[in-house]
Image (tube, grey):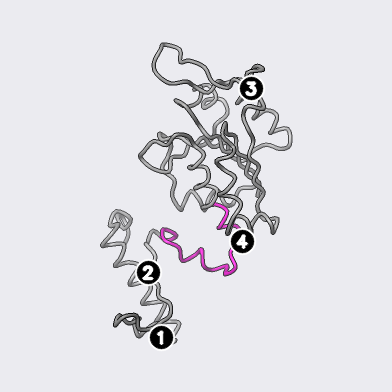
Amino acid sequence: MKIDILTVVPDLLESPFSHSILKRAREKGLLTINVYNLRKWAINKHMQVDDYQFGGGAGMVMMPEPLANAIDELQQAGKYDEIIFLTPDGATFNQKTANILSMKENLLLICGHYKGIDERIRQQYVTKEISIGDYVLSGGELAAAVVVDAIGRLLPGVLNDETSALFDSFQDNLLAPPVYTRPADFRGSKVPEILIQGDPKKVAEWRHEQSVQRTQDRRPDLLEGQE
C-alpha cells in the first residue's frame, strides 16, 4: 500500500511513522508513506499557499492552485483510490472505515491548516472527508497520523501475530476484553482462573462474554440494533 500526505508542516509527521509498527511495516516494504510539503507547489517565491477569505473573516484559507497542482502532479504516477481530506466536519473515523481503507492500494491524505482548504478542492478532488473526533486541531497532521496508524497495522504481514488485529476493540462492534500477564497474583489480585486452565474454547467464550459486558457498561451505543 502507498499513502501520500500533503501538508504545510511535514516535520510534524516525522516521528509517528519512524517508530514501532509503522516503522516495521515500511521496512518490510508493506507500506510506503510519502510526506509532501505543499509549499513545493507554492504560487510565488514567498512560498505562499494561503490567502484571505472572500467575504472577510478571521483566518487564512489554503489556496486551490497549490493543492490542485500537487494532486495533478502526484496522480501522474497513478490515480488514487481515495483522496481524503482530514476535517472536523468529515465523517467520524472508526474501525469499519479503517478496515475498508486498508484494502485500498493508493491513498492521498490532505492535511488542512489555518481555516481549511478552498471549497473548490473539496468539490473537484476530494472523494472522502474524515474527522477523528468532535474537536478542532491546529491542523490535519495529527489526524493523518491516526488514520495511517489505524490502517497500517491492518495490512497483512505487518503485525507479528496475524490474528491480533482481529481481536482489537471495535472490530466486531465490541470493546476488547480485559487482558492479563504475569504475575498471576499481583498484590492479592489474581488472574481469572479460566485463563490459566488452558482450555482455548472456554477462554474464547469467556473473552466474548467479557467483551459484551464491557461494551454494555461503557459503550452501549455500539450494541444498538444487535441481537
For residue 167: magenta?
Answer: yes
- Mark in the foreground, 2 or 3: 3
The residue that label 3 is drawn on is 42
CA gap, disc 2 and disc 1: 16 Å
Drawn side of residue 82 relative to residue 190, left or right = right
The residue that label 4 is drawn on is 158
| Mark earlier in primary sequence (4, 2) | 4
Report the amino acid beneath label 4. Val
Residue at the right extreme, as displayed: 77
| Mark earlier in primary sequence (2, 3) | 3
Other residues around mark 3 within 10 Å, as few (<14) / some (14–19) / many (≥20): some
Other residues around mark 1 within 10 Å, as few (<14) / some (14–19) / many (≥20): few
Task: Please tell me whether mark 1 sits on a helix, a strand or a loop.
Answer: helix
Q: Residue at x 41, y 58 (%)?
A: 170
Drawn side of residue 71 relative to residue 183, left or right = right
CA gap, disc 1 and disc 3: 61 Å
Q: Which residues are magenta?
A: 151-172
Report the amino acid beneath label 2. Pro
Task: Please tell me whether mark 4 sits on a helix, a strand or a loop.
Answer: loop
CA gap, disc 4 and disc 2: 23 Å
Q: Which mark is residue 104?
A: none
CA gap, disc 2 and disc 3: 49 Å
Report the amino acid beneath label 1. Ile
| Mark earlier in primary sequence (2, 1) | 2
The residue that label 1 is drawn on is 196
| Residue 216 figure quarter | bottom left
Report the amino acid beneath label 3. Ala
Residue at the top extreme, as displayed: 55
Q: Is residue 46 above or below residue 17?
A: above
Q: Residue at x 47, y 20 (%)?
A: 60
The residue that label 2 is drawn on is 177
